[in-house]
Image (tube, rainbow, N blue to C red):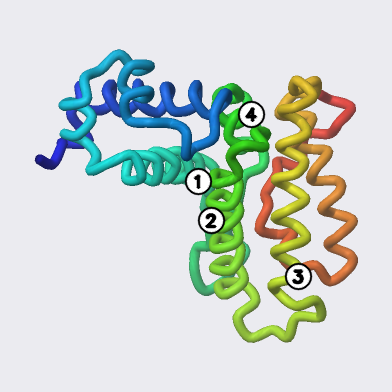
Amino acid sequence: MAANKTDPRVVKTRNSLRKALVYLMRREKLEDISVQKITETANITRGTFYLHYRDKRDFIKSAIQEIIDDFFNQVMIDSDLSKERTVQVFSLRKAFQYIENDADIFDVLLNNEKNNFFYEQLYNRLANEMTYFNEQVNKNQQLEVPLNLQISFIGSAFLGLVSRWLEDGMIYTPRYMTQSVAKMLDQCSNSNITLVDFFYSEKEVTLEEI
């Protein structure tokens, strides 16, 4: 039976299941988390679970994808970098704010040695977005630094920074993180790392004003 994803009851059930998954992932490996544990933690019946998902694998895949999709829906914004078309870029400010608001979820998903599935999925989505950005902005340009190396360098650095920020208890505000990352990326912009323009920050706000 297909569930209507826009039904408030469906949304509530799926949110409860995602919270239960995150709670369990803090304590166990994915392979050790059963449907029974998930439903008991979410306080729903197994019958309700199977109205929404075929099995545990389907649930975990869908839950992780929904988290990633919602994140990128919130942080990707239109820019005028291309004269021919509107190009979407990654808002650092929105990203750090979003992660701060859902810190419990991102901390578990990024900083749990037992489970690296989320990191891989998030990195792959970020890499895909950067690849598409490059196709739109640098379509006919010869890159001095190969695209795959740029993606590996910037993507890994950004996610590693987010992971450490969470692990350290977010001692810096999202605004401070935004401007600090922007300053570091500005250094790369002078080194033929063309993908730095994918990350957008409100440069009129300075570190001294934060």
Q: Which residue is mark 2?
A: 125
The quadrant of the image that shows the N terminus is top left
Q: Secondary structure at mark 1?
A: helix
Residue 146 position, x and y percent, is 75, 78
Q: Which residue is mark 1?
A: 72
Q: Secondary structure at mark 4?
A: helix
Q: Earlier in the sequence, mark 3 or mark 2?
A: 2
The answer to the question of whether label 2 and label 1 lie on touching residues, with beta carbons closer than 8 A, is: yes
Q: What amino acid is found at the position of numbered circle 3 in the picture?
A: Leu
Mark 4 nearby-residue class (10 Å; few <14, some 14–19, many ≥20): many
Q: What amino acid is found at the position of numbered circle 2 in the picture?
A: Arg
Q: Is residue 85 above or below residue 201?
A: below
Residue 74 position, x and y percent, is 49, 40
Q: Earlier in the sequence, mark 2 or mark 1?
A: 1
Q: Secondary structure at mark 2?
A: helix
Circle 2 or circle 1, nearest the eye: 2
Q: Is residue 137 left or right of residue 41?
A: right
Spatial separation of the CA atoms under disc 2 and disc 1: 9 Å
Q: Earlier in the sequence, mark 3 or mark 1?
A: 1
Q: Which residue is mark 4?
A: 107
